[in-house]
Amino acid sequence: MELYTILDKQACTLNISERNKEAVLERIAEIAATSEALAGINQKDILEKLSEREAQGSTGFGEGIAIPHARIPGMKKSLLFIITSRRGAEFQSVDHKKVNVFFVLLGPEDAVTEHLQILAALSRLIASTRIRREILSARTSDAIYETFVRHTRISEDDHTSSARSKKLMTIILYMQEVLYDILEFIMSQGIEGATIIESNGMGEYISNIPIFASFIDFMNADKNKSQTILLLVPEDLQDTIVNGIEKITGDLDKKDGAMIIIQDISFYKGTMKMM
């Protein structure tokens, strides 16, 4: 799906005055309720779903950007619109900075896969500081729309031309408490799919070797459980992804609990995209 096809130009709103999260969410719900994509859906229901998603963790992912999103019962097709705030609004972002540009995504309740795919494509697109700067400086909703369309097409061209230049990244993770943080970060970089294998460390088996029998009580079975995550990453993003993972896990040269392996690929066919 081309992102600009779900962008509602009329809903794009310049320089809102709201300064805190609750007020911004109310304003987003008010704007969304005027769109044809949410015809017949109550504004309070939209606000409730947006608030439920924010309660799971802020969608303000830093650098002045937030992607408030929710799946709404009764919607038939996805809706995207953009809101700017030159002074910025407090939104509990991960970097504690105010948000200046909100990319709002609302979709049908049962369109889970499509919703995730749109989020991944949107995250990849707005990683560019240039589009954020141009949208924030726009003076009309038409200018926001035209900027978004232009950058969407550039992003799709770049993505297609570099599609085969990828590496296989393997993440072996014993720190299960950070699994979902890592997956969320990976998606924010535009990675559209990964395979997760439930795996065991050597400690799962070593206690069955007679010489190590005395360690049975010492070894904690939970610590021997791991997840092995396999994904294809663009070569030019591999350092960014490694650095982002280490911001979550800590320096892997100094801390136990995870390992990252990157390998060249001589051939691949197919995709790990979410179905």
Image (cartoon, helix red, strand yellow):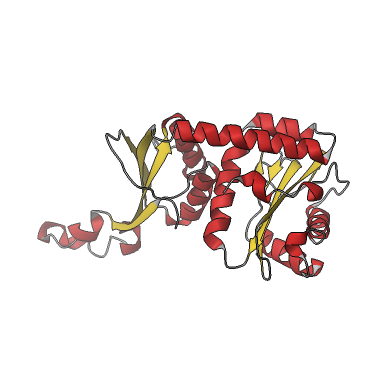
Which residue is found at the position 79% from the left and 70% from the top?
Answer: 42
Q: Is residue 43 visible?
A: yes
Residue 41 screen position, x and y as percent:
76, 69
Residue 20 screen position, x and y as percent:
82, 51
**Relative depth, front residue between 26 and 245:** 26
For the image shown, how many numbered marks are present on the structure?
0
Which residue is found at the position 37% from the left and 55% from the top?
Answer: 196
Position of residue 83 relative to residue 265, above or below, is below
Task: Residue lying at the far left in this picture: please name it.
Answer: 210
Q: Quadrant of residue 165?
A: top left
Which residue is found at the position 84% from the left and 48% from the top?
Answer: 19
In which quadrant of the rendered image does the C terminus lie?
bottom left
211 lies left or right of 189: left
Q: Quadrant of residue 261?
A: top left
Which residue is found at the position 45% from the left and 36% from the top?
Answer: 242
**Relative depth, front residue between 35 and 186:** 35
Residue 199 screen position, x and y as percent:
30, 57
123 lies left or right of 31: left
Residue 272 screen position, x and y as percent:
39, 50
**Relative depth, front residue between 194 and 266:** 266
Q: Is residue 127 visible?
A: no
